[in-house]
Amino acid sequence: ICAVLLFLSKLSIRRYCHDTRGSMYMWLTALAGLAILSLSFLKTYFGPYFAQDCAFIWRSLKLGIRLTKYKKSKPFYSLLDHFLDGAKRHPDKVFVHFEGHQYSYAEVDKQSSKVARALQAEAKLKEGDTVALFLPNEPVYMWTFLGLAKLGCPAALLNFNIRSKSLLHCFSCCGAKVLITSPELQDAVEEVLPTLTEQGISVYILSDSCRVPGIEPLAGKISNASDEPLSKELRANVTVRSTALYIYTSGTTGLPKAAVVTHERVWAACFIQAAVGVTADDIFYINLPLYHSAGFLIGMAGGIERGMTMVLRRKFSASQFWNDCRKYNVTVMQYIGETLRYLCNTPKRDEDRQHRVRFAIGNGARTDIWTEFLNRFGDIHVRELYGATEGNIGFINYTNKVGVVGRINYLHKFFFPHTLIKFDIEKEEPVRNSDGLCIEASRGETGLLVGKITKRSPFVGYAANKTQTDKKRLHDVLKKGDLYFNTGDLLQIDSENFVYFMDRVGDTFRWKGENVATSEVGDILTTANSILEANVYGVKVEGHEGRIGMAAVTLKEGEDFDCADAYKQVVTYLPAYARPRFIRLQPCLEVTGTFKMKKVKLVEEGFNPVNISDRLYFLDTEKKTYIPLTEEMYNAIMSLEIKL
Ligand SMILES: *[C@@H]1O[C@H](CO)[C@@H](O)[C@H](O)[C@H]1NC(C)=O
Ligand SMILES: *[C@@H]1O[C@H](CO)[C@@H](O)[C@H](O)[C@H]1NC(C)=O
Ligand SMILES: *[C@@H]1O[C@H](CO)[C@@H](O)[C@H](O)[C@H]1NC(C)=O
Ligand SMILES: *[C@@H]1O[C@H](CO)[C@@H](O)[C@H](O)[C@H]1NC(C)=O
Ligand SMILES: *[C@@H]1O[C@H](CO)[C@@H](O)[C@H](O)[C@H]1NC(C)=O
């Protein structure tokens, strides 16, 4: 194989030497890929995942070559250009279905031109001006973004759930001078309007009129504007490294951070659907917010890349989910965090398997739910991804192994160097040896994932906050002077190269000298009869090192907390140090916009029954069950009479 490759490479180099530099580059990339492919080939020849590895590597290679071509092209070929080409090829194809309406590619194209012209006239926008979008999940979001792209303007995607201080923070850190909102969010904007006006920000609302001074109605201007295509000259200076978007990290702690998303990153994220094997004939169901990477990049931008039809939903709804899938003939769905769990928690129905969904793309599915989901809703290829908006490394599960977030192969490792390093949970920093370098974790050991920052896998950082950006950079990892991106995620790679997600740094805590991964404990708790959802965290107890396990849980409808059963599950499946000693019953669990559970407030509130109105339980090792936690018991724990 090697000999053949060598021969081929010589041949092609000789043949293509005189060709333009662009295609020479492409061929070299392809050849480098082939060479590595052959390495992978040899290494995995006898492995059971050989065919899947090859298919995936092949698709990735083709995508890599395409990306290289786009990067080299002058002017830069952006996602917008791709959309315009699509609109030319299939103008009448449905771009998006939304609440009974449908909009074709041509209509969306025209509408985005109108938006661009209205904004150009009203806000005097020019290339490079950032515009903040504070809009609900509606098709207008899509064409407003495309309109801004036609002017070469980056869009900052504000989370429509944020208010007051947080809203101002997010708005100001992207440096936008223009805010676009919609009537249903007017109250939230009015709340911060004095500050915005003071800063000279132009605020536009997508309605025909607005009585509030300082908020300009834009809908009439848009409908009056011409839908003629806009000149490419307007965006002539946009390059692959220009900022396309600001996307806010949902952060379970502190204020959101604005991750800078370049056009290069947009393209890379778009390719996820293609890498999975989604085609232009598929129909993609976007039920996640468009202000996050999952909905916007993997969903909408990926849909534009495929030239497919999308179905947009205002808000995720577990009860309507499959009805929508049936109504619109959805073939690819998206999930995140807990939404698979929500789907599994709906009452069973006869038509559960009547749908055409063949792929589910997302991240954060836990093994138990993953299996239940497949058993209940049929043969769907779950494609679990691992990645972060601002990160420079990602994985995708392209084999059919349940519970893994991906698989590393030599090609991937070559193009995106990364490693797992030993991590000290208590100090929340990597372990370093006497030379000050990090130590690689061994196979099967949990470690912190770090991705080398290179030209091919850059880390652009966060807008307007160098401190935050620097905090994610890790120096002197394997060699003095090298630089890695700290993902803040703990992963494991097994002997077969499968990657498993373990926990977020900060979620994992230490008790009795052992690390406790909260997600694993949560998985066990939800196997108890009465428990629906569980959010696990560690709380500090006076007089003890580390943090002791606690869980906020919700109960299944109509059920009471089954102390004995919960105890049985916990004791059977968890080592003593990992068992939640305190349980707090809550009517519902607070989650972020991307359904990640909020822990910080719970950790602060602790387990004092005097301060907490929710029912609290304590794992009593003598009575061998959970018992209600009283104030006397609390005091006994604090005075160390009850041993933990
Ligand atoms: C739109 O055009 C009509 C007719 O020319 C005009 O009467 C109206 O004022 C315009 N609306 C806006 C918001 O400019
Ligand atoms: C692009 O850059 C050139 C040179 O810096 C400048 O003259 C031109 O005005 C820019 N075009 C736009 C649309 O900003
Ligand atoms: C879904 O498919 C059926 C049968 O192929 C077709 O009749 C129907 O019009 C499709 N629905 C949509 C919304 O495209
Ligand atoms: C940057 O982030 C840090 C820590 O998250 C925060 O303390 C600081 O105020 C931020 N700076 C700006 C300019 O937002
Ligand atoms: C809980 O209540 C106690 C007694 O009323 C008080 O001293 C303590 O500060 C409270 N703690 C919190 C976190 O509110």
Image: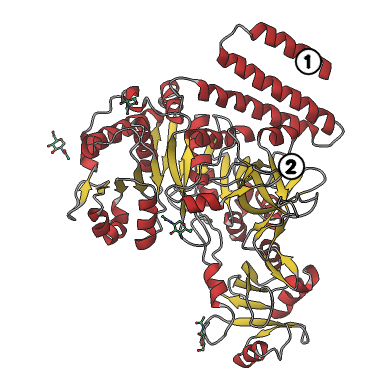
Q: Is residue 179 above or below residue 547?
A: above
| Position of residue 246 in the picture relative to residue 578 (left or right) | left
Q: Quadrant of residue 617?
A: bottom right
Depicted 486 relative to depicted 241: above or below: below
Q: Which of the 4 quarters of the picture holds residue 574? A: bottom right
Tell me residue 325's x, y (percent). Answer: 53, 45
> Which numbered circle lies on residue 6?
1
Q: Is residue 393 left or right of residue 577?
A: left
Outermost residue, bottom side:
632
Residue in view at x 52 percent, y 62 percent: 253
What is the quadrant of the C terminus in the image? bottom right
Q: Residue 100 at x, y = what percent?
A: 40, 43
Q: Secondary structure at mark 1?
A: helix
Cβ at disc 2 under 8 Å from ligand 3:
no
Dot 1 and dot 2 residues touching (CB under 8 Å): no
Q: How many marks?
A: 2
What is the quadrant of residue 401 in the picture? top right
- Quickly name the residue at label 2: 400
The label shown at residue 558 is: none
Helix, strand or loop at label 2? It is loop
Q: Is mark 1 within 8 Å of ligand 2?
A: no
Report the residue at 78% width, 86% height from top: 622
Amino acid carrying mark 1 in the image: Leu
Q: From where the camera sits, is residue 99 visible?
A: no
